[in-house]
Image (tube, helix red, strand yellow):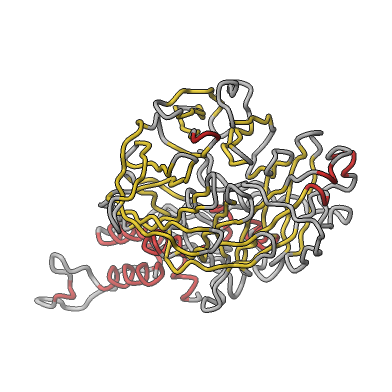
Amino acid sequence: MNPLVIMSVVAASAALVPMASADPAPAPTAAENTTRMFSAPSKDLGADYTSSADEIVQATGDAEGLHILSAREGDGFSFYEIARLKRKELSDVGPWTGYVCTTGSGNYAAAVYAPSVWSNKPGAYARGAFAAVIRLSDGKVTEIPDGVQLAYFSPGCGAGDDVAFTSSSATDTSDGRTTVISVDATTGSVSARRTVDGFLTHVTPTGKGTVGVLSGNLVDLKDDGRTKLSARTLSKVPGPLFALAASANGAVDIGTVDGGKSVISRFDGKKFTELGRAPKGKVKLLRVAKGDAVVGDVKAIDTGKAPGLAKHSVDGRVVGISRLGHLVTHSVFSEQMKGVTKGVGSSMAKGAGLLTVRATALRTGTKATTLVDADRKRPKSDTTLTMGPTAFAMSDDDDPLTCGDGGPETQCLSGNGAAVIGKIPRMETPCIVKRNDPKRQALQASANQVEWAVDQAVHDQLTLSRPADWHDTGLGAYTPQGLFPKPVLTGGGGDSRAGHAGHPRPGVQLQAGVLALHER
């Protein structure tokens, strides 16, 4: 048997989550294979669509980088790539991932991006991702010279052109400190770097200052010296948080979870007031022009006393909304990543730079799909329309919906997403193996799974059985320890290799070593 396959099988003896194998969405038809999302925009968008200033910015990643897309309603929502983010010094690292938001003026976008495999490394995703600001009028990219956090709540865009990125020193045992990197999007320059003790999330500029969430409280962030921030508690957050958005007049809206419900609440400067509930995972809270919007199953949510908070009833998953709320996207993904979810026989070499967008026009309810060639640039226009502040916002689902047909991002990476240990989000997404035979994807174990397997092997208990063709490996049935039986020793006596207390025999040592080597 190929020793590489043996190593993969042994590492897979831990209780792994299998690679997603859901049937991919049907490919766009020839009629759909155009940048214009709606073939009859006068009918689908309304007769006045050409005079609309509505626009949308979205992002998705593949091996070519993080693609930043935009579309204008006046062009029938024709999607084009306005920027592509990756690092030249990191070649052949597999797919890229990240998050994007647009500023309050709508003229700039801010993005955090990194190779997807970095989610295996706590230091990398806590403070090693890359950051950039994009001028949307011409796609000029200004890199931010700081390592930042790869998290759904960063970057933070709010009412103006200020953007907040975060970097965390948190570990599994400590909340550490959080550094807030404030950037003026108009110049792309860092205006301040200040630190606060604890794990600070959802840092968002509002019309009345910058807020964030620290130790379960909504806090007001103020400069406290050249390098320090003070965090004044405004109110306790009423439950586990999945979204925070700045609204009109300095108000803040949040989404929390209470049992099987998603709860939308508003902070008016004094206290939180619940606005309504929906089934868990059925609503999103997203930034729009001059405020925010709650989208999805909104029939039980009352926004009448929440100025700046719009609501839109939408069936199915939502990942983004346009500036004026005329379009919602259901999925934005690379055809290359759909190849990963397809499983056996797929190839990472196919589909890079071909991006599928699925969306609904809210005025008419018309659904549409378009296939975008990322290398096709937007034609120059005589008009200068500002871009709208639409952001990718996290729901109370497991992870962002940016690949496959609305499938969670980590499923495309054969992993199980982010777990929260104490107050610290901890990624447990195993690696992709894209080289060699695509029918033999190595089943990567996370660090805690490797530790479990080694503990079992030391006690001679790594004997659970795996059936034939487990996880589509094409192998016969096996037990992990059966692949590496203990050798029969001759003699022994005082030789430590014979198995004194605290010294596992060679067979176990080999097995533990293979597991450790495979995880690395």
Res 281 quadrant in image = top right
Observer-nearest residue: 464 or 236?
Answer: 236
The answer to whether residue 330 of the structure is visible from this angle is yes
Work out whether residue 141 or residue 459 is closer to the camera in this orientation and state it: 141
| Point 79% across, 43% down: residue | 52
Q: Is residue 504 above or below residue 43?
A: below
Q: Where is residue 249 in the image (x, y as percent from the top left)?
A: 52, 34
Judge whether 469 appears above or below 318 on screen: below
Q: In this view, does 31 lie to the left or right of 193?
A: right
| Residue 298, quarter of the rendered image | top right
At x 74% / y 52%, what residue is drawn? Answer: 385
Q: In front: 37, or 424?
A: 37
The residue positioned 30% from the left and 55% from the top of the image is: 171
- Give the left or right position of residue 4, taking residue 217 as reference: right
**Residue 32 x %, y %:** 84, 53
Q: List the single residue furthest toward the left.
A: 494
**The C terminus appears in which quarter of the rendering?**
bottom left
Task: Tell me: residue 44, above or below residue 74.
Answer: above
